[in-house]
Amino acid sequence: MTMLELATIRPIAPHDRHGRVIDLFTVWFGSNVHLLTVVTGGIAVTVFGLPFWWAVAGLTAGNLIGAVFMALHAAQGPTLGVPQMVQTRGQFGSLGALLVVGIVIVMYLGFLASNTVAGGEALSSLIPGWSDTPGILIVGLIGVIAAIYGHDLIHAYTRAMTYLSGAVLLLTAVWIMYVHGLPADFFERNSVSTKGLLGTISVAALWQISYAPYVSDYSRYMPAKTGVVPAFWASYWGCMLGSLLPMILGATVALAAPKSTIVQGLAHLTTGIAPLVLIVLSIGVASSNALNLYCGVLSTLTFGQTLIPSWSPGPRARIVTAVVLFGFALAGAIFSKDSFMANYEDFILLLLYVLVPWTAINLVDYYLLRKGQYDVESFFRRDGGVYGYLNAPAVACYLLGILVQVPFVDSALYTGPVARALGGIDLSWIIGLAVISPLYYFLAKRAMSRGYGRVTPLDLEAAGP
């Protein structure tokens, strides 16, 4: 029986560590096979107008590339035993980390609202005349229960969904191809463009990169002996396959179904088994909701504990915070459901610009500069311990990383001069990674040579395991 999780943001003690590497595969596969992933895949042929095989190529390339960054973050959890946003204090300082923590809380709420809209729409389509709102409530409440019970229930939930959603995904693909059938001109619809291909790659890569702030939260209970390489590959293949396969389904539905929403098109193409497909993929949405809400709670507690270092939040604080955050996300879902697709596209593009510099800084710091050696106790000190209140190079690089992308941005809200000159091709995330990774390495290396944030073997011995 899964018990209520007692830990929150403090390090997980060695005697509380548990789990197997395969759990990292199932938590990321099972939490990605759901309706929002299907909707995201449909963008390749609707927004970007690619033919099917080019859409598959773009989605594959983006997921393969983006999952590298996601999985590198996942490998940090077993070593440090703390949530990802707590570990960010090691790069930004105790107060400097608040900038990133605040942004990712908004991200979690955005994905939570988007998930509930997609799930609510699917459930409402099963009952003629039923509005989206009851479905939104049902999907949302399932996710809240899992988030309240915490880490172990979420792992158990996604483990079950790996098998259930995986089987339904396979059944859906077979049904569409061999029972319903594809239109005769299916492979001839749309035309390839450089902008469309690069846009599709970017969306798929961002889907993976957006998981970077999540992943240590679900690997921090793993025994320290788990190892970086096994944790990396289990997370990589779980998230890559769990995202790519439903995205390809989304591209298929968007091309093959009559002009409608992706969810309505999926119901049309699976006539005969539509209730099974939509219910299972809606339940899958709830598993993703649980991940978003759980991480949002840990990040909110991290934010609060930074401001009040003497506070040690427990299970009650986690439960109350989960309910409050769900209330905000629920309100957003209900008020934005009528313009869901337009809002969702703008939302994921915004994530692209603000997450890329953070992931560059975190990975360079962890793997190239400190090689996983951090003073974990300093994360919880009022003054930030050896990391101080503010790491100026990290904060400066983060803000510069956002600004340097601006000329390369192509979105509905703004198109930068370089993107305009390239015919609307958005290379912003590539530029952000290429500029900030070496710049942060150089600046942080100089700061460490002067003693900033340097952790000695004696510091690690004093901190304990």
Image (cartoon, helix red, strand yellow):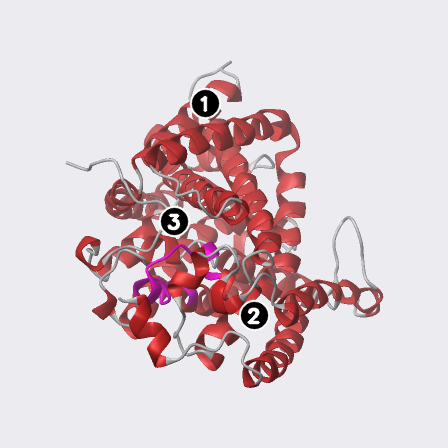
Residue under label 1, please give it.
137
**Range shown magenta:** 73-88
- Residue 156 percent location from the top left of the image: 23, 43
- Residue 189 percent location from the top left of the image: 60, 54
Q: Nearer the viewer, residue 151 or 232?
A: 151
Q: Nearer the viewer, residue 216 or 131?
A: 216
Taking 30 as reference, is 289 left or right? right
Identify the main secondary structure in magenta. helix
What mark, if any, has residue 319 been given in the picture?
Answer: none
Q: Indicate which label's residue lies in the foreground, 2 or 3.
A: 3
Residue under label 3, please give it.
9
Q: Three-letter amino acid code at disc 1?
A: Leu
Q: Are marks 2 and 3 in contact (CB under 8 Å)?
A: no
237 over 243 or under it: above or below: below
Q: Three-letter amino acid code at disc 3?
A: Ile
Mark 1 surroundings: few (<14), some (14-19) or many (≥20) residues within 10 A:
some
Q: Quadrant of the N terminus?
A: top left
Q: Earlier in the sequence, mark 2 or mark 3?
A: 3
263 inside magenta stretch: no
Name the residue at 29% across, 35% down.
149
Q: Quadrant of residue 165?
A: top left
Q: Earlier in the sequence, mark 2 or mark 1?
A: 1
Q: Three-letter amino acid code at disc 2?
A: Ile
Residue under label 2, please give it.
361
Q: Quadrant of residue 319?
A: top left
Name the residue at 40% across, 41% down.
294
- Residue 464 percent location from the top left of the image: 28, 67
Name the residue at 34% across, 69% down.
232
Q: Earlier in the sequence, mark 1 or mark 3?
A: 3
Outermost residue on the top side: it is 129
